[in-house]
Image: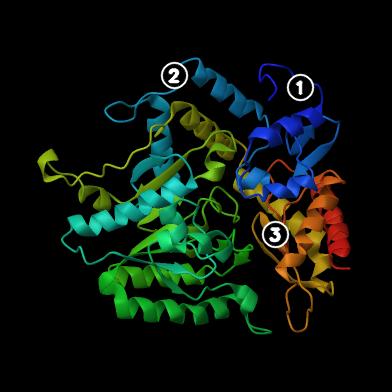
Amino acid sequence: MPNPNLPFTDSAEMVQRDLDVLWHPCTQMKDHEHYPLIPIERGEGVWLHDFDGNRYIDAISSWWVNTFGHANPTINSALTQQANTLEHVIFAGFSHEPGIRLAERLVAITPEGLERVFFGDNGSSAVEIALKMSFHYWKNSGRPEKTEFVNLANSYHGETLGALAVGDVPLYKDTYEPLLLKPRTVASPDCFYRDAGESWESYSIRQFEHMERELEEHHQTIAAVVVEPLIQCAGHLRMYHPVYLTKLRELCTKLDVHLIADEIAVGFGRTGTMFGCEQASVSPDIMCVGKGLTAGYLPLSAVLTTDKMYQAFYDDYETLRAFLHSHSYTGNPLACAVANATLDIFETENTIETNKTLSQCMTNAFAHLADHPNVAEVRQTGMVLAVEMIQDRKSRTPYPWQERRGLKVYLHGLENECLLRPLGNVVYIMPPYVITPEQIQHLAKVATEGIEIATR
């Protein structure tokens, strides 16, 4: 093994040293015998620059986290200032200014009624916190029989065991099934399966009947329903109408079941509003946020809940009713400072409003693909657009997953200044909000070329 203190001579050596010691996420490592591993030297705006003079538009916001571009000067400044002041302190028994300010701001911008903030490290940990919080609430409230969770088919909530359990994407979940709690899974409102001529709204209402039956029959033992508002992101970017959330909120209130909104991927402007729940005018009992909260800089998530939930744990120490969940880096000051800088940009640059122009640019740039013989659907919610490749448009027969058609799009993108990382046969863009209309046009051009190559 090379001396780790030795400098790298070139990118080829960097790749080899990487492959000698690292195990990368969501990757079959043997693929790198044939497909490129690309060391990145620096980022600037929407661009990622490698060591060989190539650059790539980060069309997927580096796994959906980057909201305002790489090396953003405003966020860089906030991070540097905080690092020179306080890098970390235990968040049990101690506190700090950036954490308090961030919690206050999150309470102010999230749906009404969410008044308490519990920080986590990442999206999966936020979902774990939400599940434990709901379960523990019912136990503290004298209803220990409420131990079950309801999820949607094709949902995704993270990779740790609790979060994985309430997801429903077989690729991630099937291997670990023996380790997982068993949720009650109901049919998704995923509008890809609507009848010809049927609206998103009508289909979502029709699909709600499955949820209604499940909750009516089993609400006595159900602690909470967990959903991703509007977009099932890792579930191939499938989308549904806000009316589903409206009806779900009404039913959960009626039957005394918690509604957990997992806004990890869709929060902070991705759906066209600050949070997806806003489009249904609902307030969940628990909301999980992360990813875009820190604009791709540092891991941080937050779980927001009601004062009613908080009060169920507030008691004398001897009652053992406290919520003792913790992470070493809970409320990390550096991450909180970065999150505050991110919210500053949302405010000063009126991001939600200005994104409407970018969203329309995305619509226009990809509209021609709706008539492609091997495209089943072009769908969009806000700043998320997906193109689903299909073997036969009329019968909607998908390509066999083993053919890895999306990989061909990915490789073509790398050759043409684009980081496109399809989910199976779904090509999508979820770009940083600093992208320009011209860059969107380039993404559409390269994606179209890649789809042509992949569907030959």
Disc 3 crowd, CA 10 A, few/some/many (<14, 14-19, 20+): some
Which quadrant is home to the N terminus?
top right
Dot 2 lies on which element? loop
Residue named by callout 1: 8
Compute the Cα span from label 1 to label 2: 33 Å
Is 145 left, or right, of 369 in this rendering?
left
Checking the image for residue 385, the label placed there is 3
User: Seen in the image, is 366 located left or right of residue 81?
Assistant: right
Whether residue 204 is visible, yes or no, is yes
Relative horizontal placement of residue 313, taking residue 244 as reference (left or right): left
Residue 307: % across, % down: 27, 49
CB within 8 Å, label 1 to label 3: no
* Mark nearer the N terminus (3 vs 2): 2
Nearest-to-viewer mark from 1 and 3? 1
The image quadrant of residue 247 is: bottom left
**Image quarter (top left, top right, bottom left or bottom right) of the C terminus:** bottom right
Q: Earlier in the sequence, mark 1 or mark 3?
A: 1
Query: Which amino acid does the dot numbered 1 rest on?
Result: Phe
Q: Residue at x 32, y 79 (%)?
A: 216
| Location of residue 199 in the rendering, given as x and y in whole percent from the top left corner | 62, 79
SS at badge 1: loop
Which quarter of the figure has residue 179?
A: bottom left
Q: Secondary structure at mark 3?
A: strand
Tell me the quarter of the picture where residue 49 sits: top right
Q: In the figure, 104 relative to 222: above or below? A: above
Would you name the residue on which mark 2 appears? 86
